[in-house]
Image: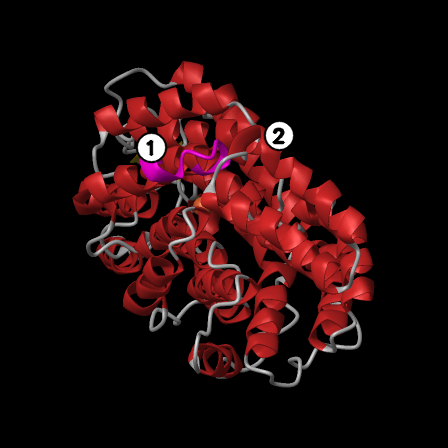
């Protein structure tokens, strides 16, 4: 066991985490709390905020739990949480002097994320992984910010780069396989992704991220019946008391929609998404299901009005993350409300500004045409943005919403050749699904 010299000049033994990484914690209890928090962040079971706060209470001089709390808050991708992140990080600053280099590097990455430079944050987390490939926190945060930046290459490669250092049986190893699975899926390696996801679940049956990765494979391959059974058969592993359940319910609704079971999708919305509106992540998924139902001609009653009210109830939310903002615009369109206030200028932070300028604001403009029934213009503008819309993050399955909207706008705007052209993309994976039949019928 090594040691380092603290500010008082006295040697202090370093206690290690369960993967052998040196920590700045003076107590084993606090390390145990951080380990629980890590597993909670990876599995979405339990309350990682409470666990990290307990770790800080047990070891008030240890900066790292506060740093992790900051990064955790940033993974919600909304301004209110980013403010909490900044506060948590400020509370860590004075404690970092005696922290080991790995923990100081975590603080630098969290700082970059807080400042809105998400690419630099990922580079800094990657720097940690070069030296410490079993740093599960660095991998998780980088993975989630790869997702928020639509960086499919690193969603795939980052877990690949660290996996050889993870021995089977090492604590948290299964969750790395779950991330590996999702990265492979977003890169189109469906067979490998499914295999990795199933192996992850052999280790931790209750790994909703791995359940989700396999659900994505089934979605992308048009295996919607199998997908519905996959989620239903593992309901106990992801749906109860889980912080990520709302998103797997979104996938359950997508499987229903592919089957043109619009009544079922509406029931899924009502039961699991309608009132889960506390976070932007949740509002995004609820909006996405309801918007798809609207495009399919389903009368959704006053649900959009309620959802729009939930978006509007969050003060100063607009202009933080373009992916969220576009969904807020869809909720407003669905509710026939004025489009939400959009700042004249894009946000100041480097990553978010680029996303807004390249994707968010052009989409907002296109959707404005849609709302004003200028469908041909909407279709043309959606077409221009859609193929680089991955730059504002989300998954292929989530961004498919833009394709639906484009096809619907093209059909309404009498741009039938364009609608047919885009619908051809469904052929390889989804040639015979009821949803494809629906679009084909409208084309006729
Ligand atoms: Fe997903």
- Left or right: residue 318 versus residue 301 is right
- Mark 1 and mark 2: Cα distance apart in space: 19 Å
Using residue 376 as the reference point, say whether residue 427 is left or right of it.
Answer: left
Q: Residue at x 68, y 54 (%)?
A: 407
| 164 is higher (above) or lower (below) than 13 | above
Camera-side residue of 304 and 317: 304
Q: Is residue 267 visible?
A: yes
Quadrant of the rendering where the N terminus is positioned: top left
Residue 348 seen: no
Q: Which residue matches tag 1?
A: 175
Say whether mark 2 is within 8 Å of ligand 1: no
**Residue 357: quarter of image:** bottom right
Q: Residue furthest front?
A: 444
Q: Which of the labelled discs sits on residue 254, or is there none?
A: none
User: Does residue 213 belong to the magenta stretch?
Assistant: no
Residue in the image at 70% along x and 49% along y: 389
- Local packing at callout 1 (Cα closer than 10 Å; few below 14, some 14-19, many 20+) is many
Q: Main secondary structure of the magenta part?
A: helix
Asked whether 225 falls inside the magenta stretch, the response is yes
Dividing the picture into quarters, in which one does residue 352 lie?
Answer: bottom right
Foreground residue among 63 and 418: 418
**Disc 1 or 2, which lies upstream in sequence?**
2
Q: Describe the element under mark 2 as helix, strand or loop.
A: helix
Q: Which mark is residue 153?
A: 2
Q: Residue at x 73, y 56 (%)?
A: 359
**Which segment did they paint magenta?**
219-226
Q: How would you rate the neighbour count of disc 2 (Cα within 10 Å): few for under 14, some for 14-19, many for 20 or more?
A: few
Q: Nearer the viewer, residue 33 or 251?
A: 251
Q: Secondary structure at mark 1?
A: helix
């Amino acid at each position: 066991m090594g040691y380092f010299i603290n500010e008082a000049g006295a040697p202090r033994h370093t206690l290690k985490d369960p993967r052998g990484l040196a920590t700045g914690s003076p107590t084993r209890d606090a390390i145990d709390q951080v380990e629980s928090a890590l597993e909670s962040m990876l599995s979405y079971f339990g309350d990682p905020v409470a666990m990290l706060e307990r770790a800080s209470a047990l070891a008030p001089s240890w900066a790292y739990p506060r740093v992790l709390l900051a990064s955790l808050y940033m993974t919600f991708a909304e301004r209110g949480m980013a403010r909490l992140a900044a506060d948590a990080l400020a509370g860590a600053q004075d404690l970092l002097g005696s922290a080991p280099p790995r923990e100081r590097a975590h603080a630098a990455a969290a700082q970059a994320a807080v400042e809105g430079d998400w690419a630099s944050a990922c580079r800094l987390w990657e720097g940690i992984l070069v030296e410490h490939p079993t740093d599960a926190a660095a991998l998780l945060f980088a993975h989630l910010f790869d997702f928020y930046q639509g960086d499919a290459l690193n969603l795939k490669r980052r877990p690949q780069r660290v996996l050889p250092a993870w021995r089977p049986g090492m604590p948290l190893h299964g969750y790395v396989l779950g991330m590996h699975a999702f990265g492979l899926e977003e890169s189109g390696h469906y067979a490998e992704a499914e295999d990795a996801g199933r192996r992850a679940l052999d280790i931790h049956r209750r790994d909703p991220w791995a359940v989700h990765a396999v659900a994505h494979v089934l979605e992308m391959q048009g295996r919607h019946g199998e997908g519905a059974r996959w989620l239903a058969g593992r309901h106990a592993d992801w749906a109860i008391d889980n912080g990520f359940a709302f998103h797997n319910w979104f996938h359950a609704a997508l499987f229903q929609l592919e089957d043109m079971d619009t009544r079922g999708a509406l029931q899924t919305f009502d039961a699991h998404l309608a009132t889960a509106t506390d976070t932007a992540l949740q509002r995004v998924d609820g909006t996405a299901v309801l918007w798809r139902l609207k495009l399919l001609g389903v009368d959704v009653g006053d649900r959009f009005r309620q959802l729009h009210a939930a978006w509007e109830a969050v003060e100063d939310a607009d202009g933080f993350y373009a992916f969220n903002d576009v969904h807020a615009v869809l909720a407003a369109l669905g509710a026939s409300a004025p489009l939400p206030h959009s700042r004249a200028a894009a946000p100041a932070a480097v990553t978010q500004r680029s996303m807004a300028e390249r994707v968010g604001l052009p989409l907002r403009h296109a959707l404005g045409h849609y709302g004003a029934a200028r469908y041909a213009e909407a279709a043309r503008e959606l077409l221009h943005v859609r193929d680089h819309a991955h730059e504002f993050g989300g998954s292929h399955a989530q961004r498919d919403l833009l394709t639906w909207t484009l096809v619907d706008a093209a059909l309404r705007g009498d741009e039938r050749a364009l609608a047919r052209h885009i619908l051809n993309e469904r052929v390889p994976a989804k040639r015979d699904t009821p949803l494809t039949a629906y679009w084909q019928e409208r084309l006729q």
